[in-house]
Image (cartoon, rainbow, N blue to C red):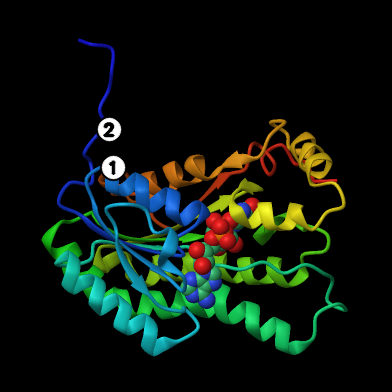
Amino acid sequence: MTGTTTPAQDFAGLTALVTGGASGIGAATAALLTARGARVAVLDRDTAGAPEGTVPVAADVTSDSQVRDAVEAAVRELGGLHILVSNAGIGSIGTVEDNPDQEWARVLDVNVLGMVRAARAALPHLRAAALERPGCASITHTCSIAATAGLPQRALYSASKGAVLSLTLAMAADHVREGVRVNCVNPGTADTPWIGRLLDQAEDPAAERAALDARQPLGRLVSADEVAAAIAYLASPAAASVTGTALAVDGGMQGLRLRPA
Ligand code: NAD
């Protein structure tokens, strides 16, 4: 024993597609699945940040034809598809009075329909993978604690993630007998470029960051790697009997019934 460990190769022989995989939580997930032995494709509208060793496939999840073409390209490159991580998403701030219909349509198109399009394109391949490797076919959605937390100033974003949660549960029921598991992760505020962009808009980004950390039950944001580890668990063979589950990675935000100030 040297005291060092090598990452478990529990994804050896498995193939995965991660949407929004070129930044933040998606990039951390694509890198982790790759390190654990999966062959991974990254679907993103901007693939520049796709982790090393992954196959980039450029597509916008608001285009059904682009998503279909990207899934087919990934399947050709990887030789199949066992795992879909549907993670691409965008934010929106405000109350119902702040955002017009067009903004609702724009955000729901990415956050909800984007996941529907990815699932529709991937499901035939996932069903085939389930026959080949029982327990290994899965879809994991990146949802959010916003789905159930009642966050202020997040009406549209929360509604979009509420829809993702419901979609996850309904899809889990529809596809359980086909051997395709469907789960979601509910991150709290996660330290990704997304949050960096929000903080940059503040008058004093460093002070705002310190205040944000202080508002978390843990005293810090969750990391993209911590969310990726939860996604990897749900997508792993170890979770073969886990479907229809929402796994919170939020530093205790929901379980402790605390609210961000
Ligand atoms: P991020 O902005 O760092 O990464 C999002 C990625 O999605 C980017 O690479 C972007 O190019 C891609 N993307 C966005 N719209 C797309 C589209 N139309 N087509 C294709 N790709 C698109 O954000 P992140 O923080 O890593 O967020 C990832 C997911 O996690 C989102 O679904 C978000 O709602 C969710 N989430 C984030 C947080 C957080 O605090 N960061 C908390 C809860 C949930």
Residue at point 28%, 12% (across, down): 3
Callout 2: SS: loop
Direction from residue 5 to residue 25 in the image, left or right: right
Direction from residue 19 to residue 138 in the image, left or right: left
User: Mark 2 highlights which residue?
Assistant: 7
Percent x, y of residue 173: 40, 67
Residue extending furthest toward the left = 132
The quadrant of the rendered image in which ligand 1 is seen is: bottom right
Residue at point 61%, 79% (across, down): 108
Q: Amino acid at mark 1?
A: Ala
Percent x, y of residue 154: 77, 65
Number of residue marks: 2
Residue at point 25%, 68% (across, down): 126
| Labels 2 & 1 near each other (Cβ < 8 A) | yes
Percent x, y of residue 257: 75, 41
- Residue 238 image-quadrant placement: top left
Q: Amino acid at mark 2?
A: Pro
The disc label shown at residue 85, or none: none
Q: Dot 1 surroundings within 10 Å: few (below 14), some, or many (20 or more)?
A: some
Q: Is residue 69 above or below residue 10?
A: below
Percent x, y of residue 106: 64, 83
Residue at point 67%, 66% (across, down): 91
- Residue 94 image-quadrant placement: bottom right
Q: Does the closest atom of ligand 1 sit within 8 Å of the Cβ of label 2? A: no
Which of marks 1 and 2 precedes in the sequence?
A: 2
Tell me, yes or no, if residue 143 can be seen here: no
The disc label shown at residue 35, or none: 1
Q: Dot 2 surroundings within 10 Å: few (below 14), some, or many (20 or more)?
A: few
Q: Nearer the viewer, residue 94 or 175?
A: 94
* Distance between the alpha carbons at the discs numbered 2 and 1: 7 Å
